[in-house]
């Protein structure tokens, strides 16, 4: 396994359950101890259940409540209904996954490439959005969506989470169990949110460790396998974060790959993995990019918001 992020660890856990001996090479020196929240959707929690980790993930996370979608002046557009999404911090999720592997399986501080893994029966490229493994197999690299994302965590409690959509960007809030609040924003700079409704200016005034990302996406790959190498997670289908599905799909990829490799015919297993996962993840990536473009509209936002209101009414 090249990469010990959420997808690589999920695959390693699943493959060990199906009798494989697995080494995970991870370039970071250790698991991270800080990180913002990830929304883990029911299909990903169900995948964790299939490797015996669903309850552990539920325990360290919390259920997401209803989220209100507003305009910058605070007017309500609609409500994202309460769902079975679990909010976990990235360190908590990685902790659950890594804790299910015996010591020594994950070799921290060990960056590797395909050439270093020649002796293995199967190599999994789980090396994230800038995957070097993908670069060796396919003529494909990530492209800018044109959007910039910002996020962080503040000591400001908020009553409810949700998103606010305005001209050229959006701002999101997710309360944490400990009274702190995760926030994220999409827009060219944070000053544009200064006159949006409360508590957005207060949250921004308290923000210290602000993370800034160019939001990138990968054009569809022709296959998620090549010979005895499989790609998963962001290495296979890096998407903009608008649907909150990247880590979820990485987990599902890992679990499904392991299930496909449970039999004796490895080549058939890899073909089955590609056919089960490629179309569905590429469709999600395309929808996420569409949503990203909608959220960044500068004109016709009234029409957009009316469409959003109808879509949210049907979602309820
Ligand atoms: C702003 C933002 C918000 C997001 N919110 C959500 C959300 O709410 N829900 C959700 O599901 N997803 C979310 N995502 C997406 C999610 O973070 C990613 O899709 C997910 O982390 C991908 O998992 P992965 O295992 O494929 O890659 P990664 O988590 O990136 O892991 C790849 C690992 O490979 C290692 N690595 C890289 N190269 C090498 C090498 N040569 N040798 C050894 N190791 C190597 C890296 O150190 C890393 O640990 C968000 C992303 C962003 C940017």
Image: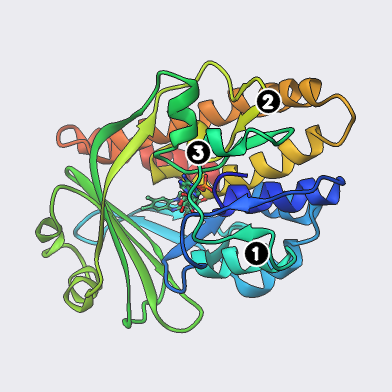
Judged left or right of residue 100, residue 189 is left
- Which secondary structure, mark 1? helix
CB contact under 8 Å: marks 1 and 2:
no
Question: Could you say which disc has been placed on residue 113 in the image?
Answer: 3
Residue positioned most to the right: 264
Q: Earlier in the sequence, mark 1 or mark 3?
A: 1
Callout 2 crowding tier (Cα within 10 Å): few <14, some 14–19, many ≥20: few
Residue 185, placed above or below residue 238: below
Residue on which the image places disc 2: 228
Place of residue 87 in the rendered image (x, y in percent of width and height, measured from the top left): 54, 65
Colour setting:
rainbow
Q: Earlier in the sequence, mark 1 or mark 2?
A: 1
Residue on which the image places disc 1: 98
Q: Earlier in the sequence, mark 2 or mark 3?
A: 3
Whether the residue under disc 1 has CB within 8 Å of ligand 1: no
Of circles 2 and 3, the one toward us is 3
Whether the residue under disc 3 has CB within 8 Å of ligand 1: yes
User: How far, Cα to Cα, is label 1 from label 2?
Assistant: 25 Å
Place of residue 222 in the rendered image (x, y in percent of width and height, measured from the top left): 53, 15
Place of residue 315 in the rendered image (x, y in percent of width and height, measured from the top left): 54, 44
Question: Which residue is located at x 17 percent, y 71 percent?
Answer: 201
Question: Which residue is located at x 78 percent, y 56 percent?
Answer: 49
Nearest the eye: 114 or 229: 114
Of circles 1 and 3, the one toward us is 3
User: How far, Cα to Cα, is label 2 from label 3?
Assistant: 14 Å
Q: Quadrant of residue 184?
A: bottom left
């Amino acid at each position: 396994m090249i990469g010990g992020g959420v997808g690589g660890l999920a695959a390693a856990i699943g493959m060990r359950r199906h009798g494989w001996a697995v080494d995970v090479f991870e370039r970071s020196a250790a698991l991270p101890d800080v990180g913002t929240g990830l929304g883990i959707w029911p299909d990903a929690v169900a995948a964790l259940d299939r490797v015996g980790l669903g309850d552990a993930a539920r325990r360290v996370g919390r259920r997401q409540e209803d989220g209100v979608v507003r305009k910058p002046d605070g007017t309500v557009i609609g409500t994202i209904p309460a769902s079975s999404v679990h909010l976990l911090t990235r360190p908590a999720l990685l902790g659950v996954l890594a804790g299910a592997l015996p010591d020594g399986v994950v070799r921290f501080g060990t960056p590797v490439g395909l050439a270093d893994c020649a002796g293995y029966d199967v190599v999994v490229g789980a090396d994230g959005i800038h995957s070097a493994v993908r670069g060796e197999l396919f003529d494909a690299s990530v492209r800018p969506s044109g959007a910039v994302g910002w996020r962080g965590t503040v000591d400001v409690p908020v009553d409810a989470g949700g998103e606010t959509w305005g001209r050229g960007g959006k701002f999101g809030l997710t309360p944490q169990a400990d009274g702190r609040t995760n926030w994220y924003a999409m827009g060219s700079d944070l000053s544009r949110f200064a006159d949006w409704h409360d508590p957005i200016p207060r949250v921004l005034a308290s923000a210290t460790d602000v993370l800034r990302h160019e939001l990138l996406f990968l054009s569809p790959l022709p296959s998620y396998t090549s010979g005895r190498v499989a790609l998963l997670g962001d290495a296979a289908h890096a998407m903009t974060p608008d649907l909150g599905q990247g880590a979820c799909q990485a987990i599902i990829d890992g679990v499904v790959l392991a299930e496909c490799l449970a039999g004796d015919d490895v080549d058939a297993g890899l073909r089955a993995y590609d056919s089960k996962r490629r179309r569905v993840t590429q469709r999600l990536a395309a929808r996420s990019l569409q949503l990203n473009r909608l959220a960044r509209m500068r004109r016709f936002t009234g029409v957009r918001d009316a469409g959003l209101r109808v879509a949210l009414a049907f979602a309820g």
